[in-house]
Amino acid sequence: MTEIATRFAPSPTGRLHLGHAWSALCAHDFATARGGHFLLRIEDIDPGRARPEHVSGIIEDLLWLGLDWEGEIVFQSERTALYAMALEDLKRRGLAYPCFCTRKDIAASASAPHGPDGPVYPGTCRSLDPETRMRRMAAEPHCWRLAMAPAIDEAGPLLWIDGDGAAHPASPAAHGDVVLARKDAPVSYHLAVTIDDAAQAISHVVRGRDLLEATHVHRLLQALLDLPTPVYIHHPLLGTASGERLAKRNGAPAIADLRAGGTDAAALVEAMRAGRFPDDYRML
Ligand code: GLU
């Protein structure tokens, strides 16, 4: 039987709030209740937003909560060579192409339909001729996109399995040609997460329902890169009493503030385990 392993994979772009603590707790308890391993991965691929002080803040907060992880912390910023290899492979197979469009170009495109994560890329750069591509690559910033239709054709029908053992058809098409490597970062969230969950031998990805749609894309990338597929468990998100999702902008309490305010960490974690949250926050 494969060993159970889960992970918490925060992006160090701010301090952890109660919603993050809940997510870390779900992943931690899933593993420890089954004699498995709980791992920590810092998703610091965004050079503009990731900050070292937030990394130390995350570590402090998790230790304060008693959510210890096993082994070395994995930093995505140290793994860019691996991501580049996977991207090269997809390029060689004609499944990735450079895109020169700006966010504004995409938003302005009359044909851009909306997908699970916002406007879907309308495909402007998909069929540029090789010469134009080469010329523009030498002169213009560009990201790399997955050629979604041929990728789906190549992978064939795919399923992902949830925590109850139910199989769900993977349907990544609605995401369009997702980004694999950004203009300003060597890799995208989708590609890095897929590669790292496999590299860390994650058996169960336990993460919030807000990432359910991304699972369809990750399942496709696993098939294309010949990576194993974990079970996916999407836990309910924490929200305010009026049903708004917890976020920093609606005053979600930072773990550091709870600590500074004298909260008892063990009592907080036990209450969350029992489904009780401070300040009328609740599961949505
Ligand atoms: N780094 C992502 C975030 O902070 C989570 C990635 C994941 O769990 O797949 O939202």
Image (cartoon, rainbow, N blue to C red):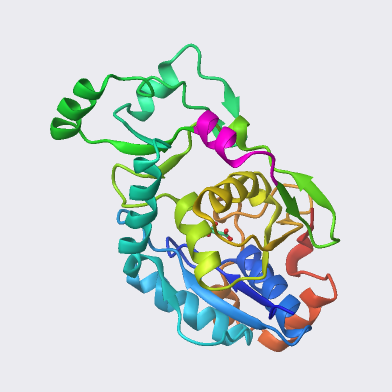
Q: Position of residue 271 (x, y in %)?
A: 80, 78
Magenta segment boundaries in residue numbering: 148-158
Residue 171: percent from the left, percent from the top?
A: 68, 37
Q: Residue at x 34, y 56 (%)?
A: 85
Image quarter for ligand 1 equals bottom right
The answer to whether residue 42 is magenta is: no
Q: Is residue 254 above or below residue 67?
A: above
- Would you say 75 lies left or right of 37 here? left
Q: Is residue 153 magenta?
A: yes
The quadrant of the picture occupied by the N terminus is bottom right
Picture coordinates of residue 283 (x, y %)?
A: 79, 58
Question: Left of 61 or right of it: where is 207?
Answer: right
Relative vertical location of residue 243 with respect to residue 248 in this rendering, above or below: above
Give the camera-side residue of 9 and 6: 6
- Asked if residue 168 can be seen in this view, the reply is yes
Predominant SS of the magenta segment = helix
> Which quadrant of the view contains residue 81?
bottom left
Considering only vertical position in the picture, is 44 above or below 110?
Answer: below
**Where residue 240 sits in the image (x, y, percent)?**
73, 54
Q: Nearer the viewer, residue 232 or 117?
A: 232
- For the point 72% across and 84% down, the residue is 32
**Quadrant of the rendered image containing residue 229:** bottom right
Name the residue located 78 percent from the left edge and 46 percent from the top edge.
Answer: 168
Q: How many numbered discs, if any?
A: 0
